[in-house]
Amino acid sequence: MVSRAGFNRRNLMLGMGAIALLSACVRPPVTRKEIAFDDVLADLHRRTFTYFWETTDAGTGLAPDNWPDPKFCSIAAVGFALTAYCIGCKSGYVSRFDAAGRTRAALRTFWNGPQGPAAEGTMGHKGFFYHFLHMDTGLRYKNVELSSIDTALFLCGALTTAAFFDGKNTIETEIRDLAMKLYERVDWTFLARETGLVSMGWHPESGLIERNWDRYNEGMMVYHLGMASLTHPLPVKAWEGWMASLDTWGDNFGEPHLGFAPMFGHQYSHAWFDYRGIADSFMRGKGIDYFINSQRATAAQRNYAIKNPGGFKDYGADIWGLTACRGPGYVTGEVNGREVSFQEYGARGPQTADKEGLDDGTIAPTAAAGSVMFSPDICVPAIKAMRDHYGADLYGPYGFRDAFNPSFPTDLPSKTGVHTGKAGWVSSEYLGIDQGPILIGLENYRSGFVWDMFNRSPLTGPLVKKAFVAAGFQPVAEAGNWLKA
């Protein structure tokens, strides 16, 4: 008997032309002529790729949440790592054989990892995975949640590999098979409410997390993947419910746009999904698309830094960027005669609409560098200014360290970083979920490679189209005509 998952996958492949999928490489057209990187961008691109290649366990594919002192695997970082292998192969940093081998190892680990409702001894449940996993066993780390968004980030990476590794050999055939099976195994309805909105996660000890993916944030990818599912799809009302929750439209330090304080919320879904020239009913009503929205959000962060309402050191036209990142610690200190409550890890960003922001003077390079795919005119100068101004204090073997704070008082201790002569406090770590947007942002800026693989390849393209069409997206500019092709 053929399973429902196998039947659907087989019919999807036949519908897209299985012969083409399993024969010689078929590449979708590139979105534009590839841009030649200068030495600074080329160096950052390669160093950031190297982070994923050297810190990820080659045998299991598990990627550390942070480096150099990893305590657990982040499944979101695995999604970024899987995408990085495709970028590294395309860029000539590693061989296709080595990249495919590393990819297959990761997908095997996640496919074979135990699933079930037990609180211990499992990697996930209902096709979802726990937010953090033990680096040695791949099992649930402490009491973390079964995470809808982190599973989505992992799946975006897995599906990218399915699109990229399209050869006839046994390794690449297995990559495609495993990636599709991992995607099809997810029961999106398990975390869905009657309204269609999706919970942020689930604990075996207490059930669904109360918070849902609503309002504008990185959760868009959860709905896209869920609505495209061939096995356990979310209903159309899921996107309608999400649109109904959008409540942060306003100037937000720039042209009118949907605000979300930390920059990662404007980057994560866009790293894979191509919103250029397409819009749902909400954005059609605003006269823009979500890509333009992220361009405006990027400019707004720079505007905020120029205005610098907190009076923090070094903020300006080329030194800017607030997002979720490491910070100096939960301590209080004085900056320009006022008391500032510094944070350790936090989702930093300016106030949006009536939502309070968080700013303690901590700048994260990933905020600007990861947005280079939106606004290179302001992000490339920021990348170069941070490297030139702070040098080796901030820029290391894997590119930019996670964050720095020139305003952090030198007499205050920090367990998360060190005081430096040029950059002030600098994080001792790199974070996988902050490195990922830098590499993908640079590659999408240079070539549109990830967008093309994910949105327009023969294997994953139909899934993306299904998701967008179900959510009511329509072409609104020439760049979006691929949606109706």
Image (tube, rainbow, N blue to C red):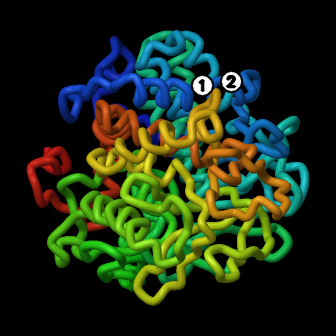
x, y percentage for residue 81?
Answer: 59, 34
Residue 186 in percent (x, y) is at: 59, 53
Is 154 positioned to the left or the right of 251 in the image?
right
Q: Residue at x 53, y 47 (%)?
A: 184
Viewer-nearest residue: 384 or 111? 384
Q: Is residue 6 above or below residue 211?
A: above
Secondary structure found at label 2: helix
* Residue at mark 1 to residue at mark 2: CA–CA distance: 6 Å
Residue 256 in view (yes/no): yes
Residue identifier under label 2: 54
Counting from the top left corner in percent of width and height, residue 255 is at 24, 73
Q: Which quarter of the rendering shows the C terminus?
A: top left
* Residue 141 coordinates in the image, percent (x, y): 85, 52
Q: Quadrant of residue 160?
A: top left
Q: Secondary structure at mark 1?
A: helix
Residue at 40 percent of width and 85 percent of height: 353
Tag 2: residue type?
A: Glu
Pointer 1 and pointer 2: residues touching (CB < 8 Å)? yes
Q: Residue furthest left?
A: 478
